[in-house]
Amino acid sequence: MKKIASLVTLVILALAAVSVAAQQKPRIAVIKVENKSPYGGENLGPALEDWLVQGLVQSGKFRVMERKDLDSVLSEQSLSLSGAVDEKTAVQVGKLLGCQLVILGAITDFSKHKTEAHGLFRLGFDVGKTTAEGTVNIKLINTTTAEIVYTGQEKGSHSFGNVSVASFGGGVEWDESQARQIFEPAVARLVSAIVQKTGDIEDSLGSASALSGKVAKVGDGKVYISLGSVDGIKAGDTLTLARVGETITDPDTGKVLGQEKTSLGTFTVTKVVGDHLAIGVANASVRPQVSDMVEKQ
C-alpha cells in the first residue's frame, strides 16, 4: 500500500513538473513579415507569418501568440501594423501582448530561371522547368531589453516542370501551394535556429520566462489581460498586478540594467474568453492601465 501511495505521489509530482515547465516557456509572437520582393504581392507576407507560427507551435518550445489573437488585441487598442514596422514598434507591441520575444521578417528578393530541353530528332518532348528562389530574413528581439538577439537569413528554392510560377509576371494568380514549396524549407531552418538561440539566452530572460502577461484593455468595469486558455489560465485564478517603470540603462555601455516594478495588488480571473484573452477584476491600490503586468503566483 505504501508503494502504491509513493508511486501516486511521484506521478503527481511529475505532472506538476510538466505543468510548471509548460508555464516557463517563453512567450513569442510573429509581429510582421514584409514582402519586399516582386513575388506574391500582399499574400506572401501573411503566408510566411502563418508558416513561422506553425513551426514555432510544432517545436513545443514556446507559448505562441496566434495571429487571430494578435489581431484581436491590436484591434481592441485601435493599432495597426500596416506599412513598415521597425524594432521599436515591434517591442512596444510585444510588451502589450505580454510576449518576451518577437519576430520581424522580410522577403528580400526573388528570382526565377527557366530552362528548356527538347527531344532529339524532333521527337517532340519538352522537359523544360522553372526554378524559383527566394530569400527570407528575420530578427528575433527580446522585448525586455529591446535587444536583437538573433538575425537569420535563409534561401528557399524549388523547381517546377512545365508550369508557370504563380504571381510573378505573366498574369498568373497567387498559388499558396507553390509558395509553400519554395519557402517552407527556409522557414523550417529559421525556426530551428530560433529554438537554438532561445535555448542559449533563456537564462538571461530571467523572470520574463515565467507565466506573465499584460493588461490589454480597461473599460466598462472590466479588465482584459493577454493570457488565456492556452496559457493554462482558469476562472478563479489570482495573479499579481504590477506597473513596470522606466528602463534603466548603463550610461557608458547602453546595456539595459533593469526596470523598476511597483506592486499594485492582485487580479482575479472571472472568465476566460480566448486562447490568450481573459477578463477579471483588480484588487489594486490604483486603477489598472494598459500594459500593466500580470503574473501567475
Image (cartoon, rainbow, N blue to C red):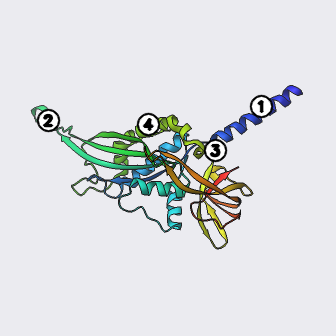
Secondary structure of the residue carrying numbered label 1: helix
Q: Amino acid at mark 1?
A: Leu
Q: Residue furthest left?
A: 121
Which numbered mark, 1 or 2, is in the foreground of this view? 1
Q: Residue 207: x, y in percent?
A: 60, 44
Label 3: how many residues lie within 10 Å, few (<14), some (14-19) or many (20+)?
A: some
Q: Residue 16: x, y in percent?
A: 72, 39
- Quarter holding the N terminus is top right
Out of 128 and 264, give the one closest to the viewer.
264
194 relative position to 225: left or right: left
Q: Residue 176: x, y in percent?
A: 37, 51
Residue 57 visible from this viewpoint: yes
Q: Distance from label 1 to label 4 (Cα)?
A: 35 Å
Q: Which badge, 3 or 1, is on the more N-terminal residue?
A: 1
Which residue is denoted by mark 2 in the rendering? 123
Answer yes or no: do the residues labelled 1 and 4 have beta carbons within 8 Å? Answer: no
Which residue is denoted by mark 4 in the rendering? 193
Query: Residue at left 33%, top 40%?
Result: 156
Which residue is denoted by mark 1 in the rendering? 10
The image shows residue 228, relative to residue 19, as above or below, that is below
Which residue is denoted by mark 3 in the rendering? 23
Secondary structure of the residue carrying numbered label 4: helix
